[in-house]
Image: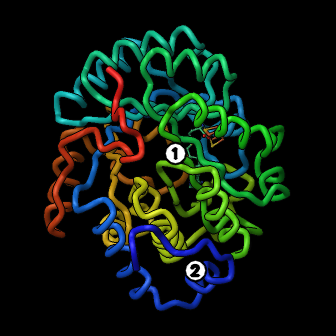
Amino acid sequence: MNVTGVKPDKSAIITMLTTTPAEELYRQADQVRHDAVGDEVHLRGLIEFSNICRNDCLYCGLRRSNKTVKRYRLSEDEIVETAHRAATMGFKTIVLQGGEDLHFDQAKMCRIIEQIKLLDVALTLSVGEREYADYKAWRDSGADRYLMRIETTDRDLYHKLNPGMSWERRHECLLMIRELGYELGSGIMVGLPGQSVESIAQDLLYLKEIGIDMAGIGPFIPHPETPLTCETGGTLEQALRTMAVMRLLMPDINIPATTAMESLHPQGRIMALQAGANVVMPNVTEGEYRRLYELYPGKICVNDTPAYCRSCISLKIQSIGRRIGQGYGGHKCHKLEVRN
Ligand code: SAM
Ligand code: SF4
Ligand code: FES
């Protein structure tokens, strides 16, 4: 396998997702990861700053129809203080993630971004679909990266799972974000009800086609307070296979070992790091907010502290002979790694 990636051929992808022996696939992805991006694992400090959302995605515990959730949003000061503590702990990237909470309007987000950028960190936003003017203002304020999963490229499935939303609009947002010069992260969930292996292969081709810099791939885990509670959900193997194939298709992008993988298996993130992943996003949110940001049940680390998690994941990374990246850990295609 070379570092330019395997040919994007749909039937070959389907074979890798289904019949190639898993260990063989993981070994190839691990080798390609080693050759293309090296042995560093980049840590991103994840701040879950609001669990309030205007959307009603059928899979998500934060959907607006879930009346059992105690809702919260951090204040601007709390967000900046949390980012400051994370930077002091050594995180070189901060990720601000939340529901689509319009309380955080363009100007508020700009103020938060400007203050966090004083901490000498790269800043990733993950706040869903907004207007072009918002994306532009936030980029102008210093945001470096944006994460928004396309979730699935099966339009019919997307529209069933995301009432009131449009696949075309989400796709358009991703193109705007890329055009504004953000490093673009996207990805999918695997194991969605009605999702076929052909559709997952199509998803991977789509992610390659739009030229993402980061790919987040996680298993769908059914939440009891959603309409999908009785569905089966994705398996760790399905998620690892999909992630490994993504690595083979796009050798030098950043790929996180996702939290949802570890929620299915105590060593899920380590297994992912040995099957193509090179990023981990430890939670740096404080106190009860960790528990209240419940996208799916069984989320890890809800009773732990940011410092504990940082040391826990560092030890795990070292135990497999890898080292923690000391830089911002951007995609190497982006020459200007981070704007200060
Ligand atoms: N609201 C923003 C958005 O939807 O893009 C960002 C936050 S959203 C909670 C982050 C991701 O969580 C979604 O893109 C989705 O893939 C994932 N997610 C939501 N519900 C999930 C579930 N039940 N199982 C696994 N992942 C889930
Ligand atoms: Fe809101 Fe994102 Fe959850 Fe959908 S996945 S309900 S947009 S937080
Ligand atoms: Fe949170 Fe291990 S990363 S306890």
Mark closest to the chain's N terminus, 2 or 1 = 2
Q: Is residue 157 left or right of residue 54?
A: right
Whether residue 278 is visible here, answered yes or no, is yes
Q: Amino acid at mark 1?
A: Gly
According to the image, label 1 marks what residue?
185
Indicate the quadrant where residue 1 lies. bottom left
Q: Where does residue 97 sit, x and y in percent of width and height?
A: 48, 34
Q: Is mark 2 within 8 Å of ligand 1?
A: no
Indicate the quadrant where residue 306 lies. top left
Q: Is residue 30 left or right of residue 242?
A: left
Q: Where does residue 301 sit, x and y in percent of width and height?
A: 33, 49
**Please, is residue 189 above or below residue 29 in the view?**
above
Q: Where does residue 9 sit, x and y in percent of width and height?
A: 65, 76
According to the image, label 2 marks what residue?
17
Of the pair 28 and 191, the residue shown nearer to us: 28
Image point (63%, 29%), residue name: 100
Classify the position of the C terminus by image quarter.
top left
Q: Amino acid at mark 2?
A: Leu
